[in-house]
Image: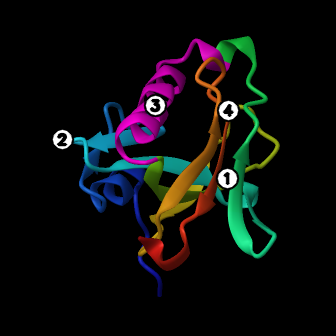
Amino acid sequence: MPRRWTKTEAFEHFGTRLTNTRWSWSAISEDGSVVALVLWQDAVKGRDGKLVYHDDSELDAEWRTRPGHGERIRHLAHCRDHLDGRFRAVIARAVDKEADPRDIASCHPQEGVWWKLDEFDEGTGAFVAHVVPGGA
């Protein structure tokens, strides 16, 4: 039987700690060398032979005012500015993909995989990322 991870445990696996277990959707290690983000499983797609995540941030005004959104923007900016765009992923499966906001049915750290930002809009938080070949 596969291990059942809590969101907190999945982030801690990468040496990152959530600011708040309820509203944080990203975290950064104490030394700033690793950022981890929740990526929704249904939004990870195969495109042109690689895995891509496209968060077009169809975010309503309410989500944009939530602390988790601002925190995630800061963490993505840190990736862009200090980590060559690289981050780790906690893959989450939604209880209901149509819900807003979503709740996590299950999650796990994505082992041996690094993602890299292709696009990032610091104003909205929208981003596009792909899996780095070879995981490095």
Asked if the stretch drawn in magenta spans residue 78, the answer is yes
Residue holding disc 1: 94
- Left or right: residue 127 compared with residue 23: right
Mark 1: give few (<14), some (14-19) or many (20+) Cα within 10 Å: some
Residue 48 to residue 16: above or below: below
State the residue in front, 97 or 133: 133
Q: Which residue is mark 3?
A: 77
Residue 53 vs 135, above or below: the answer is above
Contact (CB < 8 A) between labels 1 and 4? no
Q: Is residue 35 left or right of residue 135?
A: left
- Dot 2 corresponds to which residue? 30
Q: Are marks 2 and 3 in contact (CB under 8 Å)?
A: no
Dot placed on the residue nearer the N-terminal end, 2 or 3: 2
Please name the amino acid that badge 2 sits on: Glu
- Earlier along the polypeptide chain: callout 1 or callout 2? 2
- Does the magenta run of residues contain 39? no
Kindly report which numbered mark, 1 or 4, lies closer to the viewer in this rendering.
4
Type of residue at label 3?
Answer: Ala
Q: Is residue 23 visible?
A: no
Q: Which residue is mark 4?
A: 126
> How far from the left and from the top, in percent, is residue 26?
44, 40
Q: Which residues are magenta?
A: 63-84
Q: Look at discs 3 and 4 and give the one toward the viewer.
A: 3
User: Which element type, helix, strand or loop, lies under badge 2?
Assistant: loop
Tell which circle, 2 or 4, labels the residue nearer the N-terminal end.
2
Q: CA distance from mark 3 to mark 1?
A: 26 Å
Gap in Å between the C-alphas at discs 2 and 4? 25 Å
Residue displayed at 43% across by 26% down: 74
Q: Amino acid at mark 1?
A: Ala
> In the rendered image, is residue 44 in sight?
yes
Front residue (pair 64, 115): 115
